[in-house]
Amino acid sequence: MADLDQTLAVALKGYAWLPDLRRRAGGGPVRTRVMGQPAVGVCGAAAARFFYAPGNLERHTALPGLVVHTLFGAGAVHTLDGDDHLRRKALFTSLLSGDGIDRLAKIAGEEFDAAADGWRGGPPVRLFDESARVIARAVSRWVGMPLEDREIVTLARDCVAMVDGFATAGPRAARALVARRAQEHRLSKIISGVREKPLTTSPLSVIAHHSDDGTPLDPRVAAVELLNVIRPAIAVAWFVAFAAHAMDMWPRHQSRLRAGDDEYTLAFTHEVRRFYPFAPFLGGRATRDLFFHGEPIPAGTLVLLDVYGQNHDPELWTDPYRFDPDRFLDREIGEFDLIPQGGGDPRTGHRCPGEKITIALLGTLSRRLAALDHYLPPQDTGIDLSRIPARPRDRIRLVVPEHRMSAPVPAVSASRSPVSGES
Ligand code: HEM
């Protein structure tokens, strides 16, 4: 079966496809074919180490066109290899570290409070959509590009569309392509304008003035990279909806978040990112003949790292299908263990440079939500694992009654959330 092309099976089975294939093959590396090409699926900390070892795999020939043209954008850092990648990556690692993270989390907390005031005493709102707008407001203020309300609504809608449409051809992909074209066009004009002015410390100005090799980036590529900060920040709305799902399923987590314990909040964010589905697997192409666990991997083979499978691997996580933030209290997280946002060192490899921002935003908004008096009216909170990216079916409808929140809730500090691989 695994020798037949599996592209349709991926579309039908979603997150379960690669874990099922590996299970049927006995658990080790599994040979398969996707998009008409030979591929090997791997999983586990050793596999992640192999996947991220310098020189083993390249990305620019491995990424499907649909993913590039919906999710990342042409010329994005995700599509670069070697020195080109290192030079571009330095832009992200410097922008997405330090005090800026706490500032963004604080702004997001303020925007959540302002939005929640408007929900009080009103009809049900959809938390997923509202969180996307809250983060869109926060991140556009943070990058130095404050927008009017209707522009925020469009930015949030377009960024959600780009993420929602990356994995399946059809209407969702079409919406993603249209959204990307519109935002790249709009942002490249803003970039050209900002270039006329002197460099400042705002992320918008730093990206507009960035050059890999002495020449500024093409304004369209600079717009792509600006979107590579704004869009994934807005995508944290997926995790906020999952956090609400967890609090609804197991209300004791809501009380523990309300108590405001930083260690517990951090553990909760790790568990949301581990437990719930987002990136199904990652792909790279072997640059030379390789071996993994005795399995020959000829040059040119696609190597698929099973992200969802690894985040539920019983060898790494006791009782992996139990939502249990306590597993992260007092646990050292290895560089290649918890990989919802990739593994290894984000400065040198392709690991997500936005992990600390994700943790800070998710922690801040989860605590705000836990402290907000609200309830979920009857709805379908089911999560369909054949849909990539998955989300609760009704996008978490919630009602906020008339009375006010008891006390202001602090933002979650990034300095309390070290990510493995960064010093
Ligand atoms: C919803 C939360 C997020 C998830 C699930 C996520 C997931 C990922 C994954 C799986 C990768 C690819 C790793 C690889 O190819 O090896 C990645 C890369 C990347 N992420 Fe994130 N991410 C998130 C949030 C963020 C945030 C908040 C930012 C920035 C503000 C960000 C910026 C990036 C960039 C620029 C890359 C490309 C890195 C490279 O190719 O070197 N991400 N992310």
Image (cartoon, helix red, strand yellow):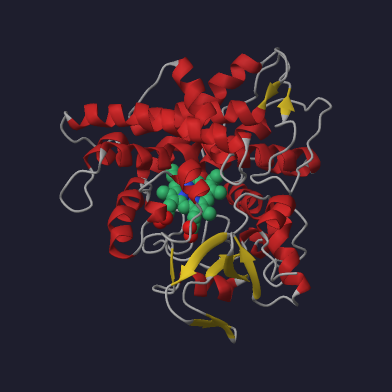
Q: Is residue 156 left or right of residue 217?
A: right
258 lies above or below 64 = above
Of the pair 40 and 154, the residue shown nearer to us: 40
Q: Is residue 32 left or right of residue 161?
A: right
- The percent coordinates of residue 300 (x first, y second) are 47, 72
Of the pair 90 and 111, the residue shown nearer to us: 90
Q: Is residue 184 left or right of residue 357?
A: left
416 lies above or below 411 = below
> Where the N terminus falls, by quadrant?
bottom right
> Where the C terminus falls, by quadrant?
bottom left
At 47% from the left edge and 38% from the top edge, which residue is drawn?
Answer: 231
- The percent coordinates of residue 326 (x first, y second) are 69, 57
At 81% from the left edge and 29% from the top edge, which residue is drawn?
Answer: 379
Q: For residue 373, say whether it is visible.
A: yes
At 51% from the left edge and 25% from the top edge, which residue is drawn?
Answer: 111
152 lies above or below 338 = above
- The percent coordinates of residue 3 (x first, y second) are 69, 71
Q: For residue 410, say whether it is visible.
A: no
At 54% from the left edge and 19% from the top edge, which residue is drawn?
Answer: 114
